[in-house]
Image (tube, rainbow, N blue to C red):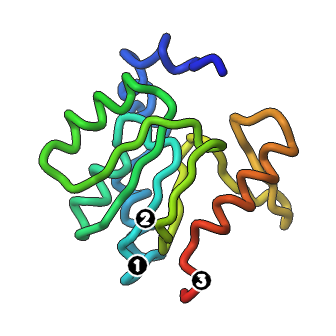
Amino acid sequence: MINEYVEIVNYYDNLLTSGYFNYDSLSNILYNLLGTRRKVLDIGIGTGLLTEKMLSLANYNIVGVDFSPRMLEIAKERLGNSDVRLICEDIIKFESKEKFEAIVSTGGVICVVEENGEYRICSHISDPEKNKQLLAKLHSQLDEGL
């Protein structure tokens, strides 16, 4: 798989913080939605922009997965001494015995949007079968006790 993010890594944070996402607002929304849930899988964590904001609100236990080594280097610098575990892997191949209370993806691998009362999946993965496999895999990563 070609890693398109190699070319934009130096501009990524500027692009995403210039109005593309409001990470303060998004982290507050997630804080309210997640309630007491703290164990979070962040797929497509990128440079850790959202995770940084989330950690300022609560003591989350976050595992971040991204397929860009350079993005994860920046995330590691940004997140400093936090306990966030960063994993460099294609999310389609990601395997973990851990269960998570929530899975987030911000402009990364996959998102769900509501349009005229219907929900649609937007994804960087162009193969519909791989998207189905990914959704099934992510579902299996969720803690069933919730």
Q: Quadrant where the C terminus lies? A: bottom right
Residue for point 39% across, 55% down:
63
Residue type at mark 2 is: Val
Mark sitting on residue 104: none
Mark sitting earlier along the chain (1/3)? 1
* Pointer 1 with pointer 3, Cβ within 8 A: no
Indicate whether 20 appears above or below 2. below
The Cα–Cα distance between marks 2 and 3, rounded to whole angstroms, is 14 Å
Residue for point 78% across, 47% down:
131
Mark sitting earlier along the chain (2/3)? 2
Residue type at mark 3 is: Glu
Mark sitting on residue 37: 1
Instruction: Look at discs 2 and 3 and give the one toward the viewer.
Output: 3
Could you tell whether 91 is left or right of 132 in the image?
left
Residue type at mark 1 is: Arg
Residue for badge 3: 144
Q: Quadrant where the N terminus lies? A: top right
Could you tell whether 13 is left or right of 96 in the image?
left
Mark sitting on residue 40: 2
Count of picture labels: 3
**Residue 113 percent coordinates (x, y):** 72, 55
Residue 108 lies in what quarter of the image? top right
Indicate whether 146 appears above or below 55. below
Circle 3 — which element?
Answer: loop
The crowding category of the residue bearing disc 3, from other C-alpha atoms within 10 Å (few below 14, some 14 to 19, many at least 20), is: few
**Residue 118 percent coordinates (x, y):** 85, 63
* Pointer 2 with pointer 1, Cβ within 8 A: yes
Of 121 and 128, which appears nearest the observer?
128
